[in-house]
Image (tube, coloured by chain):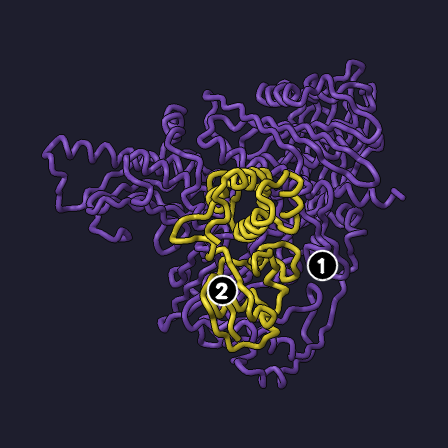
Chain colours: A yellow, B purple
């Protein structure tokens, strides 16, 4: 099956019931999306599918044919961090960083739809994500910072 | 030699500065820093980066001291083949011991390089020069000089936002096989029968392994191994431990050992009976899970010479190596443990996954990777010990404590965990502190501050309950009975931050205070909560924090905010439910942890007193928070609190 991942067409010969997260990590070698719970509960596996934040750990890969999948690796155009990525670094919006790709992806999806989200919008968009290190205060700041940057999302 | 270019200068010395309480094979001298002919610098430490930012701190202070780019500094952490021995990354001690020592090493290198320039102008010695530095306790001045070199923005941040950082869960070798384990349905269950005939027909099946108490399947892919496991049929003889999460509080006391006395000052019995008022309480904190975001994972590969290499995530590569050597029955020198990026730990990430991978690899003759799923993580990982705490305390007519009698029963046979934070800072002339251990139905282990947060919950809730019963303001009651200046200072500071004197509690709105000490640091917190419609919302937490000198204020505040958030989970929702030797809530659906919508406004004030040398930052922030929130909930509802977590107790009695 042909799936576009980070603007490259991949051809996978896999069972269409396999989960997108497994195919990304094991077949495409993209380990930016993380396994956290396997139930769509923690958000660590989040990727963009046609610009929508999607839990790859509960998404059958067969449903991705003809869709555009973007992982956190795909946000870095020409080696430059996207404005969302840069804001997470600048605000130290992480500790261990395991959940960070998921937060970065959902923030990117939020800002694609809503370029000036309120704090409530931000929290609501990210409530499906768990950061066990508890960097939430900084994550909100990072999203606000990224939203204040007119260049956000240009790498998509 | 580790450096890629030719080493021209090498700094050696003890890997830690000061009187670190370290046991084991601490070398008197080891290679700490090397400078290569191309100018690149390599530094070595057995500490692990698991989110606290030590790679950033170490790199920045070396680069800044030597006035070179951070890209030219390579801090090598936690690889037993490359770094000096370390007991493990615990006790919030990395920066003040190893960091300070590497700073000393960088300064020695700087002085040597400057001298060379002065002497011959070329610095082109052909032989490597070795300089030995001392491991003396750093002076406050040394720490003061270190501070401006730290820098806030994490040098490893870009790798974390782009997916480049390789965690143990991401690590893979070419040609690795994958393991999937068959676990007993409950703790202590014995295998009676196993049928793997159909599993062997699954494409990619390599081998069923039964060895060293481990049952698992090795497959060419993770999917093949998991699928094969789903075709294995087992029958077990379950012992069915009687204790459940409901009966544990009484079991802790009934089955507990004789308490060990940690302190016995004055005549406690006389004090308790002579006081104007005796107030008693019994408090309970259940098992909680570390529930770090990255489940356990490890890859193991055996060499033809019987050597073993393990790539994993753990807080101590050398303790991991010792565990593997003991359990595999091989010489530790034959084992190399390499710690990859660690996706959170807080105290867990047990050695078991490395051991399991090593056994499957040995039996199958392949390199094997094992990565737990979330249910395995919840059902097999070590948990913070539950505890029952009994407190009897007496005050005289003026509200002065005259006697404090504290007995805690902590689950598990590791006395050290339960003892941390058990002592009382209050001035009661008769004080007795006793801690007992009790059989633990679940595998128990470390957690942020070990038992510190548990003991603080009991003590600080009791203090506030006493103040309320005596009709004394909780801040005044503490200050009246607490002469230690650093405790007083954090209390007075947090009172100012929270505008304590003019707070207005009402039905459903409450304020709670708690004070604590852990890893050498003092911390006071005020929580403001709203209880409405059967739901507790923590609106604001003020934190005053005294860890002496501060190297990196933003990194410290990040750790303190994280501690507040983590401790808030234990206050409101977290409890590992279990029955008959099996954990019942094994996912984030059943085990509720704090999310972004739960997070209060958090204000942190660092005292930053230059006259006190730096102390721990990663753990102390968690010790008072559960009590502060519990006290605020009691203030809001008018009902005393005696156990955690709080939210289920509120929900159960609301319509």
Q: Residue furthest right?
A: B655
Q: Read off the residue under disc 1.
A: B583
Badge 2: how crowded within 10 Å, few (<14), some, or many (20+)? Answer: many
Q: Residue B132's x, y, as percent?
A: 27, 38
State the residue in front, B508 or B43: B508
Which chain is indicated by disc 2?
Answer: A
Q: Quadrant of residue B331?
A: bottom left
**Residue drawn where x is 15% and y is 34% of the image:** B116
Locate residue A46 relative to residue B172 in the image: left or right.
right
Residue sticking out furthest to the left: B120
Q: SS class of the residue under badge 2? A: strand
Indicate the secondary structure of the residue bearing disc 1. Answer: strand
Count residues near mark 1 (Cα–Cα under 10 Å), then give few for <14, some for 14-19, many for 20+. Answer: many
**Closer mark to the observer between disc 1 and disc 2:** 2
Q: Is residue B29 left or right of residue B253?
A: left
Q: State the separation of the CA atoms marked 1 and 2.
A: 39 Å
Q: What residue is disc 2 on?
A: A5
Both marks 1 and 2 on one chain: no
Percent coordinates x, y for residue B269 in the rendering: 77, 27
Q: How many marks?
A: 2
Task: Decide: is B310 above or below B155.
Answer: below
Q: x, y (%) of residue A120?
A: 67, 40
Which residue: 58% across, 83% down?
B202
* B70 up-or-down from B339: above or below: above
Q: Is residue B124 left or right of residue B101?
A: left
> Dividing the picture into quarters, in which one does residue B634 lie?
top right
């Amino acid at each position: 099956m042909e799936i576009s991942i980070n603007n490259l067409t991949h051809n996978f010969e896999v069972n269409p019931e396999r989960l997108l997260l497994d195919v990304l990590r094991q077949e495409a070698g993209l380990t930016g999306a993380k396994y956290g719970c396997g139930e769509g509960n923690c958000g660590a596996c989040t990727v963009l599918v046609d610009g929508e934040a999607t839990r790859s750990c509960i998404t059958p890969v067969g449903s991705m044919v003809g869709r555009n999948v973007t992982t956190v690796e795909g946000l870095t155009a020409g080696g430059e961090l996207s404005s969302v990525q840069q804001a997470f670094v600048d605000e130290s919006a992480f500790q261990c960083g395991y959940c960070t790709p998921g937060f970065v992806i959902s923030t990117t999806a939020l800002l694609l739809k809503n370029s000036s989200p309120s704090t409530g919008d931000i929290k609501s968009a990210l409530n499906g994500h768990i950061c066990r290190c508890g960097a939430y205060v900084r994550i909100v700041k990072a999203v606000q910072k990224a939203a204040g940057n007119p260049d956000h999302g240009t790498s998509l | 030699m580790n450096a890629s270019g030719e080493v021209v200068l090498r700094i050696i010395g003890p890997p830690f500065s000061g009187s670190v309480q370290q046991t084991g094979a601490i070398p008197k001298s080891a290679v700490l820093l090397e400078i290569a002919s191309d100018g690149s610098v390599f530094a070595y430490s057995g500490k692990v980066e698991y989110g606290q930012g030590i790679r950033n701190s170490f790199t920045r202070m070396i680069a800044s001291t030597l006035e070179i780019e951070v890209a030219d500094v390579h801090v090598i952490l936690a690889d037993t083949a490359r770094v000096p021995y370390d007991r493990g990354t615990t006790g919030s001690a990395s920066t003040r011991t190893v960091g300070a020592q590497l700073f000393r090493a960088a300064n020695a290198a700087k002085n040597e390089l400057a001298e060379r320039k002065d002497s011959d102008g070329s610095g082109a010695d052909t032989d490597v020069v070795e300089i030995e530095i001392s491991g003396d306790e750093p002076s406050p001045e040394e720490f003061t000089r270190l501070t401006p070199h730290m820098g806030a923005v994490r040098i490893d941040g870009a790798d974390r936002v782009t997916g480049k950082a390789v965690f143990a869960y991401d690590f893979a070798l070419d040609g690795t096989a994958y393991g999937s384990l068959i676990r007993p349905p409950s703790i202590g269950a014995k295998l009676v029968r196993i049928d793997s005939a159909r599993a062997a027909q699954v494409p990619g099946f390599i081998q069923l392994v039964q060895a060293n108490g481990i049952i698992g399947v090795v497959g060419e892919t993770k999917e093949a191994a998991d699928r094969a496991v789903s075709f294995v049929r087992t029958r077990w003889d379950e012992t069915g431990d009687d204790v459940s999460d409901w009966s544990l509080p009484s079991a802790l006391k009934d089955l507990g050992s004789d308490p060990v006395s940690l302190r016995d000052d004055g005549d406690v019995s006389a004090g308790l009976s002579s006081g104007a008022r005796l107030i008693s309480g019994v408090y309970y904190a259940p098992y909680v899970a570390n529930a770090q975001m990255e489940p356990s994972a490890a890859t193991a590969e055996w060499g033809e010479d019987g050597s073993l290499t393990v790539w994993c995530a753990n807080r101590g590569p050398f303790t991991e190596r010792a565990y593997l050597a003991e359990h595999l029955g091989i010489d530790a020198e034959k084992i190399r443990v390499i710690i990859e990026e660690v996706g959170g730990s807080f105290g867990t990430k047990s050695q078991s996954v490395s051991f399991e991978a090593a056994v499957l690899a040995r039996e199958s003759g392949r390199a094997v990777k094992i990565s737990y799923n979330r249910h395995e993580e919840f059902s097999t990982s070590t948990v913070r010990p539950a505890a029952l705490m009994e407190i009897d305390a007496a005050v005289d007519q003026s509200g002065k404590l005259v006697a404090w009698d504290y007995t805690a029963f902590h689950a598990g046979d590791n006395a050290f965990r339960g003892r941390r934070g058990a002592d009382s800072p209050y001035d009661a002339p008769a004080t007795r502190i006793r801690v007992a251990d009790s059989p633990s139905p679940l595998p128990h282990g470390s957690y942020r501050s070990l038992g510190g947060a548990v003991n603080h919950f009991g003590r600080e809730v009791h203090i506030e309950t006493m103040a309320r019963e005596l009709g004394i303001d909780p801040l005044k009651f503490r200050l009246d009975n607490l002469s230690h200046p650093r405790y007083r200072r954090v209390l007075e500071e947090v009172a100012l931050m929270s505008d304590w004197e003019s707070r207005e509690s009402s039905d459903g709105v409450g304020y709670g205070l708690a004070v604590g000490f852990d890893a050498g640091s003092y911390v006071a917190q005020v929580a403001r909560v709203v209880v409405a419609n059967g739901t507790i919302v923590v609106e604001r937490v003020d934190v005053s924090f005294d860890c002496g000198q501060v190297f990196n204020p933003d990194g410290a505040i990040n750790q303190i905010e994280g501690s507040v958030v983590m401790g808030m989970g234990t206050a409101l929702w977290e409890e590992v439910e279990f029955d008959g030797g099996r954990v019942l809530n094994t996912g984030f659906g059943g085990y509720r942890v704090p999310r972004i919508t739960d997070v209060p406004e958090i204000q942190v004030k660092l005292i930053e007193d230059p006259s006190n040398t730096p102390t721990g930052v990663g753990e102390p922030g968690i010790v008072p928070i559960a009590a502060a929130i519990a006290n605020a909930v009691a203030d809001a509802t008018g009902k005393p609190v005696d156990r955690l977590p709080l939210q289920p107790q509120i929900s159960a009695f609301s319509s």
